[in-house]
């Protein structure tokens, strides 16, 4: 099997990896914000419920959650929806990743939001700003700056975590490399796949460094 | 009629009674200085006026309009503190300058000044448009001139706003920055300014909202001694342009020079009140005497801030 053939197969898997990564971010970033509101609300039942949920998701392995999302609908409704529909496995993996990462993100947001001083809220209040205006014009922009380092950490972890999706047979880059290993007894595609991750994460690191520098125009 | 009338303000936090019945009034253009040692309730009083805290008892009236009644609030079904819209309207009678500035660090000086009023202006413009449509409809139905005049009067209140448009607001913000001597810093971020400059921006930010009464909560306490002067100078100039102000301060010298009235607070009550001369030179209460003596001793020693 030639180098270009392997590259083609790995690229195919890497496309799935990237798609899973990007879609997870697209859904988990806003969902995390909603969950963080839930975990900070003054309405106690909702707060405890949200925090309990976050505890479960953060306290159990992502791999287990992948199995649960994939198999439980079939057990409950007698129709294994994710196994039958087209791209069902990918959708199941996406759901599990979004829920898992939204919970992690929500804790980062919560830390960021709670780190904004009371004085900022009071300044807005005496200037007659509404709660919504206060949050979107004053609190959130400052939170964004503060959470970039922990978020970049989490996002880089997500790139690598996407390889877990293979446990429900989503054909990502690791799955592709492993297939070549078992069919052709070739070892080097595994390392080659690792290089894909390295380059991708290298680019992300550069990007986050750039964003961090961009946000450096003010200090708190 | 007094611009501000405060009667019987009481406030407790848990079992600690911080304010035990505060009465005072303020005329337009007057400056009142509130002095007293830490924990005497000065800051809590200011926070009650700005509705950052809600007094348990007592009333607050501005220009004869009753803004707050502790007794009514206690039994009210919809409490003021949960009524965002009404609360904002009431708060805008007052401006507040904080001890530690509380500028928005991610916004330039100019953006700090413009943020709240431009958001306000946008919603005011929307409301005005709606009101104008309603008025036109009402005017079409009206037959007599008297009725029309009546309708116009009714809607004038709804259409009223602080600034005509964004242009006018910007001009006002620039003028205010000029007043506090920071027009050349308009594009800087707060972190690039000294403490004194930051506090002057905070004062300008409060002024752009056109408050009836401007409150200062120890405006120079977080500043190095050499920076207090520039902030006090701005407050002095505001007095000359007839701004009504309440200043909580530890600067005795300043209180004596600038204030029309001085209130000395101790343990949640007004212990002594009157003209600066009455309070500083002829204090009647023992507590006030002791406080002023300790203060002047401190001023002679290391605590000399002038």
Image: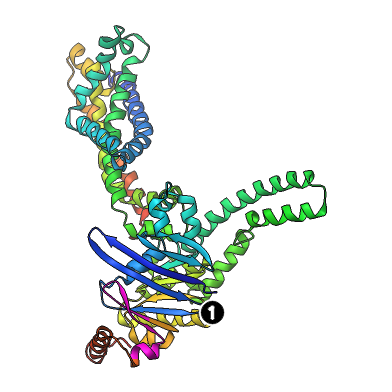
Within 10 Å of disc 1 (Cα), the crowding (few <14, some 14-19, many 20+) is few
Magenta highlight on residue B244: no
Looking at the image, residue A95 lies above or below residue B223 = above
Judging by the rendered image, the residue that carries numbered circle 1 is: B242
Left or right relative to B27: residue B215: left
Q: Quadrant of residue B8?
A: bottom left
Please provide percent x and percent y for residue B165: 63, 59
Q: Is residue A137 above or below residue B236?
A: above
Quarter in which the C terminus of chain A is drawn: bottom left
Q: Is residue A184 above or below residue B263?
A: above
Location of residue B65 in the rendering, given as x and y in whole percent from the top left corner: 53, 64
| Subunit of label 1 | B
Q: Quadrant of residue A192?
A: top left
Between residues A215 and A69, which one lies in front from this camera angle? A69
| Label 1 secondary element | loop
Q: Which residues are magenta?
A: B263-280
């Amino acid at each position: 099997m030639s180098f270009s053939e392997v590259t083609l197969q790995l690229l195919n898997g890497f496309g799935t990896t990237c798609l899973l990564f990007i879609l997870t971010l697209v859904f988990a970033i806003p969902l995390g914000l909603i969950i963080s509101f839930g975990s900070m609300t003054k309405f106690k039942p909702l707060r405890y419920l949200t925090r309990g949920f976050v505890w479960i998701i953060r306290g159990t392995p992502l791999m287990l959650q992948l199995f649960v999302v994939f198999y439980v609908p079939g057990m409950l409704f007698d129709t294994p929806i994710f196994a039958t529909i087209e791209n069902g496995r990918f959708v199941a993996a996406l759901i599990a990743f979004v829920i898992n990462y939204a919970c992690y993100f929500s804790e980062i947001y919560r830390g960021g939001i709670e780190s904004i001083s009371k004085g900022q809220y009071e300044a807005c209040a005496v200037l007659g700003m509404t709660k919504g205006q206060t949050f979107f014009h004053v609190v959130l922009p400052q939170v964004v700056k503060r959470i970039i380092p922990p978020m970049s950490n989490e996002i880089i972890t997500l790139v690598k975590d996407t390889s877990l999706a293979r446990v429900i047979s989503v054909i990502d880059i690791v799955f592709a490399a492993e297939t070549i290993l078992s069919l052709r007894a070739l070892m080097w595609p595994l390392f080659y796949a690792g290089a894909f991750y390295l380059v991708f994460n290298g680019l992300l690191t550069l990007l986050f460094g750039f964003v961090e520098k961009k946000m450096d125009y003010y200090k708190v | 009629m007094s611009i501000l009338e405060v009667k019987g303000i009481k406030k407790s936090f848990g079992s600690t009674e911080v304010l035990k019945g505060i009465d005072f009034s303020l005329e337009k253009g007057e400056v009142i200085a509130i002095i007293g040692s830490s924990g005497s309730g000065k800051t809590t009083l200011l926070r009650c006026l700005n509705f950052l805290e809600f007094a348990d008892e007592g009333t607050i009236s501005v220009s004869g309009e009753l803004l707050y009644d502790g007794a009514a609030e206690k039994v009210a079904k919809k409490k003021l503190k949960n009524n965002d819209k009404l609360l904002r309207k009431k708060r805008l009678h007052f401006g507040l300058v904080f001890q530690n500035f509380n500028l928005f660090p991610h916004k330039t000086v100019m953006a700090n000044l413009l943020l709240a009023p431009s958001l306000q202006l946008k919603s005011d413009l929307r409301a005005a448009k709606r009101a104008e449509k309603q008025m036109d409809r009402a005017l079409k139905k009206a037959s007599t001139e008297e009725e029309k005049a009546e309708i116009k009067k009714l809607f004038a209140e709804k259409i009223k706003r602080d600034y005509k448009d964004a242009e006018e607001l910007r001009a006002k913000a620039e003028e205010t920055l000029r007043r506090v001597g920071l027009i050349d810093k308009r594009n800087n971020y707060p972190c690039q300014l000294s403490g004194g400059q930051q506090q002057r921006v905070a004062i300008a930010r409060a002024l752009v909202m056109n408050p009836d009464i401007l409150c200062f909560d120890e405006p120079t306490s977080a500043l190095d001694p050499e920076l207090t002067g520039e902030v006090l100078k701005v407050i002095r100039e505001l007095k000359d342009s007839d701004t009504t102000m309440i200043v909580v301060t530890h600067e005795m010298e300043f209180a004596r020079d600038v204030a029309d009235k001085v209130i000395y607070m101790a343990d949640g009550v007004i212990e002594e009140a009157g003209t600066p001369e009455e309070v500083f030179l002829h204090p009647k209460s023992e507590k006030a005497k002791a406080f002023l003596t300790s203060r002047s001793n401190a001023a002679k020693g290391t605590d000399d801030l002038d």
